[in-house]
Image: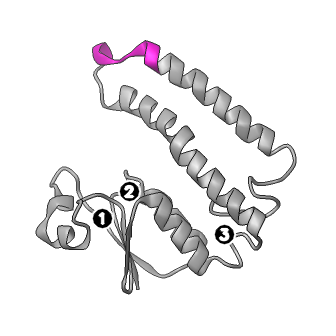
Amino acid sequence: MIKIYGSLVSRATRNLWTLEELKLDYEHIPLDWAKQENRSTTYLKINPAGKVPTLVDNDTVLSESLGINLYLAQKYGQDTLWPDSDPKIALCIQWSFWASAELEPMAYGRIREFMFKKKVERDYTLIANMAENTKALINLVSHALETSTYLVGETFTVA
């Protein structure tokens, strides 16, 4: 059975969503950051870096949520989340990396400023810049969706 290690307030959430979309049986093993369970001897044997998420699928052990999602989609989602042709596969990978590299830092940056900093510590100029950058990124997605239902054509994918 597939195992996914990570908290529901971590990037493991995107992997849990993918597992649900694929309707796969899996075991979710939550790790409590406050208790440093990601630094336990047991977990470090699975992932020596102590990062989450980590996926264990038989002999395959992967970390990094984007890599895990692409693996799950390619291995188990041939008729669902993984595109059926080369150009669409490339677009799927492109949009996945784009979201991780471009969109996610803007979202996380704003969350960090509002949730993890006291009001007096917040960088409101940075927050405003991230909000403006996010608008531009959302416009790119909107433009891509003008010609298709989803980012990779007419089928919902892991992208």
> Which quadrant: the N terminus?
bottom left
**Image marks 2 and 1: residues in contact by CB distance under 8 Å:** yes
The residue that disc 1 covers is 30
**Color theme of the render:** one colour
Instruction: Kindly report which numbered mark, 1 or 3, lies closer to the viewer in this rendering.
Output: 3
Q: Nearer the N terminus, badge 1 or badge 3?
A: 1
Give the SS element for disc 2.
loop
Circle 2 residues within 10 Å: few <14, some 14–19, many ≥20: some
Residue 41 place in picture, x, y as percent: 12, 69
Q: Nearer the N terminus, badge 3 or badge 2?
A: 2
Residue 8 numbered mark, or none: 2
- Residue 155 shown in magenta: no
Q: CA distance from mark 2 to mark 1?
A: 7 Å
**Image marks 3 and 2: residues in contact by CB distance under 8 Å:** no
Asked if residue 22 shows in the view, the reply is no
Asked if residue 51 shows in the view, the reply is yes
By secondary structure, the bulk of the magenta-drawn segment is best described as: helix
Q: What are the residue bounds of the magenta stretch?
A: 119-126
The residue that disc 3 covers is 81
Which residue type does callout 1 highlight? Pro
Q: Residue at x 75, y 63 (%)?
A: 88
Which residue type does callout 2 highlight? Leu
Give the SS element for disc 1.
loop
